[in-house]
Image (cartoon, rainbow, N blue to C red):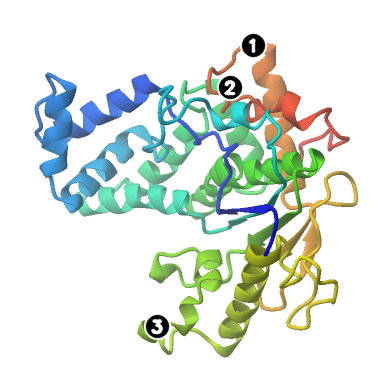
Amino acid sequence: LHSSQVLGHWGGSALSPAAVISSDRAQQQAVALAREVSCPTSSSQEVVSCLRQKPANVLNDAQTKLLAVSGPFHYWGPVVDGQYLREAPARALQRTPGVKVDLLIGSSQDDGLIDRAKAVKQFEERQGRANSKTAFYQALQNSLGGEDADARVLAAATWYYSLEHSADDYASFSRALENATRDYFITCPTIDMARLWARRARGNVFMYHAPESYGRGSLELLVDVQHAFGLPFYPGHQGQFSLEEKSLSLKVMQYVSNFIRSGNPNYPHEFSRRAPEFAAPWPDFVPGAGGESYKEFSTLLPSRQGLKQTDCSFWSKYIRTLKASAGSGSQHGWELGWGLKDLLGPREPGPKSYSK
């Protein structure tokens, strides 16, 4: 049996800005949702009791309507209450675990937060409003300022991600905003988590990324989840996946199965050292220049390096410096480069110019 523990992160990181929300914000969102579905709000007990009686579709529609006003990242999340969750994940990670824990972590270009934003556009369209497109990218844009709606961060992010896309073209500009929010909330925190784990030698670290061109978005499941759990082979999805996609799924399942048993996706047993025959070896994630390898979940399962290096440098260096210059901070450590300056160590050389 594998003597150490394994940890799998599918499409996210404990270091994400969305890892926790404040108690005040959680209460405000609960009250706003209660009012939207005509629940009394005079006491917490009344709010909870009434919301529990509402059908799920009613709550979902009400939440989507609220997202159209407040932005897609007024999400529900855990609160540091001192009991169930005693501290923010970023703070907990400062302690070294007593046992070796191997990490498999990754992200998908179709991660779900963007679908949340698109729900805003669909809601506006159902209401007969012609400016649904504007509502969609305005909601995305609002989210980039963080919980305190920092106008400087919002302006900087909008400028940076607009360098490749015209702000005059909706499709192009909304795509830029999708990339910005995905990088900020999911992809870059995922890379930072892998980097932190590897630097502290807490165990083996393996990272993956699923590109946008693979997967069946209509199935409402991310491509990494689809392949890791063998969705192409489910009877209910016969004929929806190509032979290439089925082959890819088999290989991803083998990688995951090996990792669960040995802590390494390349070997079925901890003592194994024979190269895998079903696919090319999955390289370790090694932080620093010339490293940071990851496996791309596409047809040939290529190994690549430096995922989103320039874009994540924008968030971890430029935005961190911008916020530090103003002396602002966050009690939960989810802004200012996710509050991980001390955890991640000294900055490595990176792009000095952010012109694309």
* Residue beneath the point at 44% across and 43% down: 137
Q: Which of 45 and 100 is in front in this view?
A: 100
Q: Earlier in the sequence, mark 3 or mark 2?
A: 2
Circles 1 and 2, Cβ within 8 Å, touching? The answer is yes
Q: Give the Cα separation between the discs numbered 1 and 2.
A: 10 Å
Res. 326 mark: 1
SS of the residue at dot 2?
helix
Q: In this view, does 260 lie above or below 80?
A: below
Location of the C terminus (image quadrant): top right
* Residue beneath the point at 49% across and 84% down: 241
Type of the residue with mark 1: Ala
Horizontal side, residue 144 vs residue 284: left or right: left
* Residue beneath the point at 41% across and 34% down: 78
Q: Give the Cα separation between the discs numbered 3 and 2.
A: 47 Å
Tell me the crowding category of disc 2: few under 14, some 14 to 19, or many 20 or more residues within 10 angstroms, Cα based.
some
Q: Is residue 356 visible?
A: no
Q: Which of marks 1 and 2 is nearer the N terminus?
A: 2
Asked where in the image residue 213 lies, by quadrant, the reply is bottom right
Q: Is residue 301 above or below residue 224?
A: below
